[in-house]
Image (cartoon, rainbow, N blue to C red):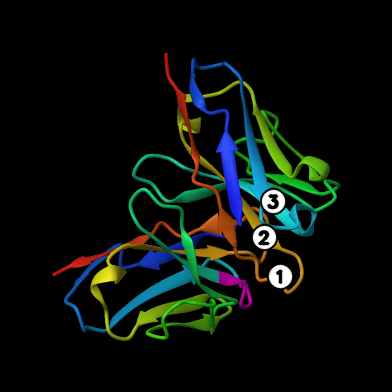
Amino acid sequence: DIQLTQSPSSVSASVGERVTITCRASQDVSTWVVWYQQKPGKAPKVLVYAASHLESGVPSRFSGSGSGTDFTLTISTVQAEDFATYYCQQANAFPITFGQGTRLDIK
Amino acid sequence: VQLEESGGGMVQPGGSLSLSCVGSGLRFGNYEMNWVRQAPGKGPEWVSYISTSGTTIHYAESVRGRFTISRDNDQSSLFLHMKSLRAEDTGLYYCACQRVAGATGAFDYWGQGVLVIVSS
């Protein structure tokens, strides 16, 4: 199975700050990585697919990069509505796997 | 697009339960379907996949042999039959779909989830 390791597991930030979350895969997944945002009581929501493609309707302050085994989700200027938990997911091979999550909270 | 799950509840260890998911607002037969679960306070865990025609199926190792996924495209429905349930199967079960055309690997749409509790 492909393991996804996210770091950090939690991060505190103020509104307007830049935040970077990383996701490392245990083997090459090409660009088959998706980033989700999840808020309490809600299903995950797609932010970025194919490692770097912004989902329609997602604010441009979100961006993704990477290929192979190392991936990054960046929020250029954090807004109040961005405080949530973020997950990466690989779709390169079954079983589909998720990272353990990164919780972004208010400093 | 709406995906609506049903069938959850509380069951004793070793018991069985069947989940359903009905889709609306989408051409159901054009989407690959999955079940994804989330234990309380944990991240999502993929459970099972079924192709558009139902001919290709995958399971997570943790549920293989105990869970069975199926679909009825005419009824825009997805099913998960679960048997020999364990405490570790407790969680919120989501149905989630993946587009085939322009596939990205993402779970594009999710239901609201249905709660399964396995406890004596």
Tag 3: amino acid: Met
Q: Are the residues at dot 1 and dot 3 in contact (C-beta closer than 8 Å)?
A: no
Q: Quadrant of the C terminus of chain B?
A: top left
On the image, numbered disc 2 is attached to which residue? Answer: B98
Residue B32 placement, left or right of B2:
right
User: For numbered disc 1, what is the local secondary structure?
Assistant: loop
Residue drawn at (53%, 28%), measured in percent from left and top? B8
Front residue (pair B22, A60): B22
Q: Are the residues at dot 2 and dot 3 in contact (C-beta closer than 8 Å)?
A: yes
Report the disc number at residue B33.
3
Residues shaded magenta: A28-33
Residue drawn at (41%, 56%), measured in percent from left and top? A100
Badges 1 and 3, same chain: yes
Sequence-wise, the earlier of marks 1 and 3 is 3
Magenta stretch, overall SS: loop
Crowd class of label 1 (few under 14; some 14 to 19; many from 20; radius 10 Å) = few
Magenta stretch contains residue A30: yes
Crowd class of label 3 (few under 14; some 14 to 19; many from 20; radius 10 Å) = many
**Distance in Å between CA atoms under marks 1 and 3:** 13 Å
Magenta stretch contains residue A72: no
Residue A84 at x, y percent in the picture: 31, 62
Tag 1: amino acid: Ala
